[in-house]
Amino acid sequence: MGENSRTIKRVSRIGSYAIASSITDPTCVSCTTFNILAPIYKRLSQEDPSYRESDVKGFWLNRNKRILDWLLCERASIICLQEFWVGNEELHPLCSSYKVKSFLILQGLLTAVHKDSFRIISHRELLFNDFGDRVAQLLHVELIVPFSQCRNNNVRQEILIVNTHLLFPHNSSLCLERLRQVYKILQYVESYQYENKLNPLPILLCGDWNGSKSGHVYKFLRSQGFISSYDAAHVYADADAHKLNLVGHCHGLCNEEVKELWLQADVDRNGVIDYKEFKQQIWNTYSDQGERERDKVWDDIINGTVQTIGFSVKNAVLFPAEVEKGMWPEDYSLSDHARLTVVFSPVRMPCSRLT
């Protein structure tokens, strides 16, 4: 008991109350998403922008070891990393405890699930095929922990995990490209569910979205039924766009650029970008007949009686903790991004509608 208490206190001290909670409650599932700042992107000199951390092994080796220590100490059920550098061999000890799938393009992604919690059914890699070499990764996993509330054999215990890193909106044209990237992700997830004849199941969208609650990417995802885990844990509403004043880039859009972007995306001028409208505007991917057939299949699934596992958000924390107060600590050097950890409590729910 004493040793367990010391372990929990240690985890809590390093800024992860959410993980400490999951340790005391074995029925929880935790997820950490973190842009770890690739050494090839970290500048060491303002006078010489080409001088990067990747040029000095001692620098990036020390930082990578510290990142690894944090990750192994937290022991999140799911880990989603962005800017995972191809030279990050020091993070390979993760493989001893996790099943790891990495997507090492220029914008490297690593998605790992704990061996004691999940079985990987399948994984897919999605190239956006646009500038910036942005990508996404999809993992289809099954929970193997016998959660007490989900022990019924008729309850499906599968989830889809998406890890991505979107473009940063330096101008209005990139904002529209970001919407295209998100659309491609949702389209790919929908196609994967359809092709594999999956019943509705939870979808976790993780990664570095390079946006805010006031951005159109966030609003579009909310319009499709997704919720912010952090907002759910802290009881924030969509109107609380400035409740969490995160420190970051200041390259915002002016009013004229926002109007230009919206006019391009909002076809029927009703002030809302909906799923079908966005699909018609950018791709016209499917014929009307194909859409009707797909809708019929989903209607059959939705009207079924199969139950699936769902998740309620139990807690969510950002680290460093100062970030939650809108400050960035000068002594934090693990990355130029904060780390988000969320704890979910699995619940049983009927398949009454699509996730």
Image (cartoon, rainbow, N blue to C red):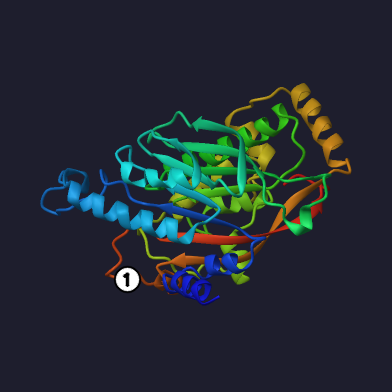
Residue 281 to residue 234: above or below: above
Q: Position of residue 228 (x, y in %)?
A: 60, 58
Three-letter amino acid code at disc 1? Pro
Q: Residue at x 49, y 57 (%)?
A: 75
Q: Mark yes or no: residue 83 visible.
A: no
Q: Quadrant of residue 190?
A: top right
Q: Position of residue 28 (x, y in %)?
A: 64, 60
Residue 100 to residue 42: above or below: above
Q: Position of residue 8 (x, y in %)?
A: 50, 72
Q: Which residue is mark 1?
A: 329
Judge the density around disc 1: few (<14), some (14-19), many (≥20) Cα neighbours within 10 Å.
Answer: few
Residue 52 to residue 228: above or below: above
Disc 1 on helix, strand or loop? Answer: loop
Q: Position of residue 214 (x, y in %)?
A: 52, 59
Taking depth in this image into account, of 198 and 117 the one nearest to the observer is: 117
Q: Mark yes or no: residue 48 visible.
A: yes
Which quadrant of the rendered structure holds the N terminus?
Answer: bottom right
Q: Is residue 344 left or right of residue 82?
A: right
Taking depth in this image into account, of 247 and 137 the one nearest to the observer is: 137
Q: Residue at x 76, y 58 (%)?
A: 148
